[in-house]
Amino acid sequence: MPLRTIPAEPYASRRMAFFDRWNEDGLAIKAYAIQRNPDPAVQLLSAEVAAAARKTAMTALKNNACDVRASGLGFCIVHVGEEAVWLLVDWWISGGILCQQMYSAPLQQPEQFQPVQGPFMACVWELQVTAHERGAWMRHVLRGEPDADAYLADVLPAGSY
């Protein structure tokens, strides 16, 4: 069976950066931003979008913290993309299992995050952050003496990926 031709634009790198660590009620999450616009004069995220992402991400983390397998640690990605502003909230359970809840907001209302339903996981740019976080988790937590502080300090360097 021949491969179907799927229309796609050639890959172009996007600007990415760690921008904050959020700690609430014994839970901690690293926050990253991805911006589709390559112009460095364009802000990665507005303060309003960052605040809305924080509220949504911490609520998701708190709602899942009651799971006895939850570590209370995770990361999120706020991606100003072509179709929407995407928010991926990821948290670690049972040693090496990563859970995720995805949200989106219209580009015209980027603070209005709503849960995304469907079989979605991440796009190629978001997977860059996820790959770094997987490595950080393995380096600092999945070892003889887990070090949560070292995990939280290990962030993807800012750049275009």
Image (cartoon, helix red, strand yellow):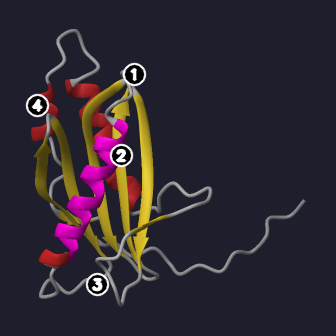
Which mark is in front, 2 or 3? 2
Binning the other alpha carbons within 10 Å of mark 2 as few (below 14), some (14 to 19) or many (20 upward) gives many
Q: Which numbered circle lies on residue 150?
A: 4
Q: Secondary structure at mark 2?
A: strand
Which mark is first along the chain, 3 or 2? Answer: 3
- Label 3 crowd (10 A; few <14 / some 14-19 / many >=20): some
Q: Could you tell me if the residues under marks 4 and 1 are in contact, i.e. CB atoms within 8 Å?
A: no
Q: Residue at x 22, y 9 (%)?
A: 144
| Coordinates of residue 106 in the picture (x, y in percent) | 41, 82
The amino acid pointed to by label 2 is Asp
Question: What residue is pinned by disc 3?
Answer: 37
Q: Residue at x 13, y 50 (%)?
A: 22
Q: CA distance from mark 4 to mark 1?
A: 19 Å
Q: Residue 125: where, in percent of width, then height?
A: 39, 63
37 up-or-down from 91: above or below = below
Residue type (three-letter) at the residue carrying disc 3: Asn
Q: Secondary structure at mark 4?
A: helix
- Between the residue at mark 2 and the residue at mark 3, the CA separation in whole angstroms equals 24 Å
Say which quarter of the image contains residue 124: bottom left
Say what secondary structure mark 1 lies in. Answer: loop
According to the picture, the residue beneath numbered tag 1 turns out to be: 94
Q: Nearer the viewer, mark 3 or mark 1?
A: 1
Q: Position of residue 2 (x, y in %)?
A: 86, 64
Residue at mark 2: 90
Q: Which residues make up the magenta segment?
A: 49-64
Q: CA distance from mark 2 to mark 1?
A: 14 Å
Tell me the chief SS of the magenta region.
helix
Residue type indicated by callout 1: Ser
Kind of residue indicated by mark 4:
Ala
